[in-house]
Image (cartoon, grey):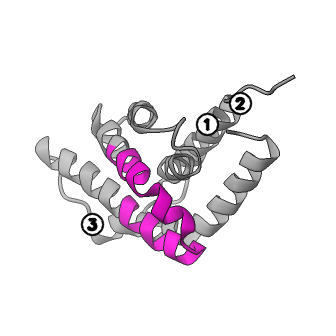
């Protein structure tokens, strides 16, 4: 019997659910600002690993869910994650061949851009600008990227997600 061309959709969904759980963990205030955007990290991974299955539409959907989870302005994360997915898809062939430390730098730029879009949409509704530690999460996300990448790759290979 031949295996289906696409499998492992449940693993993709489960990885996003774990990212949402990590997003809503109650944290002390000193740790909240440096907490990475787990959903964005997972989205970048899947866009790079299987770009034919996870793309801009998925980015938009998980962004809407992120807005609901964080009680944010509806659509701000959807816009940011759709842009993140688009850029990840455009760069996926290049980023895949980079060593992990260069991937981490690329991911940091993508995460900074995502945070900039969220900040930009907040400014439209008159919310105050964020402090400098707002950008710390992108740096922490980049530092954690090698670990996230290795865990997600092992998960993808173990469950043969294609």
Q: Position of residue 129 (x, y in %)?
A: 19, 58
Q: CA distance from mark 1 to mark 2?
A: 18 Å
Residue 17 shows which numbered tag? 1
- Foreground residue, 103 or 74? 103
Using a 10 Å C-alpha cutoff, classify the residue at mark 3 as few (fewer than 14 neighbours), some (14 to 19) or many (20 or more): few
Question: Which residues lie in the magenta part?
Answer: 83-111
Residue 50 shows which numbered tag? none
Residue 150: image quadrant is: bottom right
Q: Main secondary structure of the magenta part?
A: helix
Residue at 59% over, 72% down = 100
**Which quarter of the rendered picture does the N terminus lie within?**
top right
Q: Of label 1 and label 2, which has the lower sequence position?
A: 2
**Which quarter of the rendered picture does the C terminus lie within?**
top right
Q: Of label 3 and label 1, which has the lower sequence position?
A: 1
Tell me the element at label 3.
loop
**Outermost front residue:** 1
- Foreground residue, 24 or 60? 60
Using a 10 Å C-alpha cutoff, classify the residue at mark 2 as few (fewer than 14 neighbours), some (14 to 19) or many (20 or more): few
Question: Disc 1, disc 2: CB below 8 Å?
Answer: no
Q: Position of residue 156 (x, y in %)?
A: 72, 46
Residue 7 shows which numbered tag? 2
């Amino acid at each position: 019997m031949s295996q289906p061309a696409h499998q492992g959709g449940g693993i993709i969904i489960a990885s996003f659910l774990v990212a949402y759980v990590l997003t809503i963990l109650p944290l002390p205030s000193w740790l909240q600002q440096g907490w990475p955007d787990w959903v964005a990290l997972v989205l970048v991974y899947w866009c790079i690993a299987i770009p034919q299955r996870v793309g801009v539409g998925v980015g938009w959907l998980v962004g809407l869910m992120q807005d609901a989870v964080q009680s944010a302005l509806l659509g701000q994360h959807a816009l940011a994650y759709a842009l993140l997915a688009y850029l990840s898809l455009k760069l996926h062939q290049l980023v895949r061949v980079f060593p992990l430390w260069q991937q981490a730098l690329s991911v940091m730029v993508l995460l900074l851009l995502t945070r900039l879009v969220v900040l930009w949409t907040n400014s439209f509704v008159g919310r105050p600008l964020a402090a400098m530690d707002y950008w710390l999460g992108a740096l922490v996300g980049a530092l954690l990227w090698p670990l996230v990448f290795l865990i997600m790759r092992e998960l993808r290979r173990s469950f043969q997600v294609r």
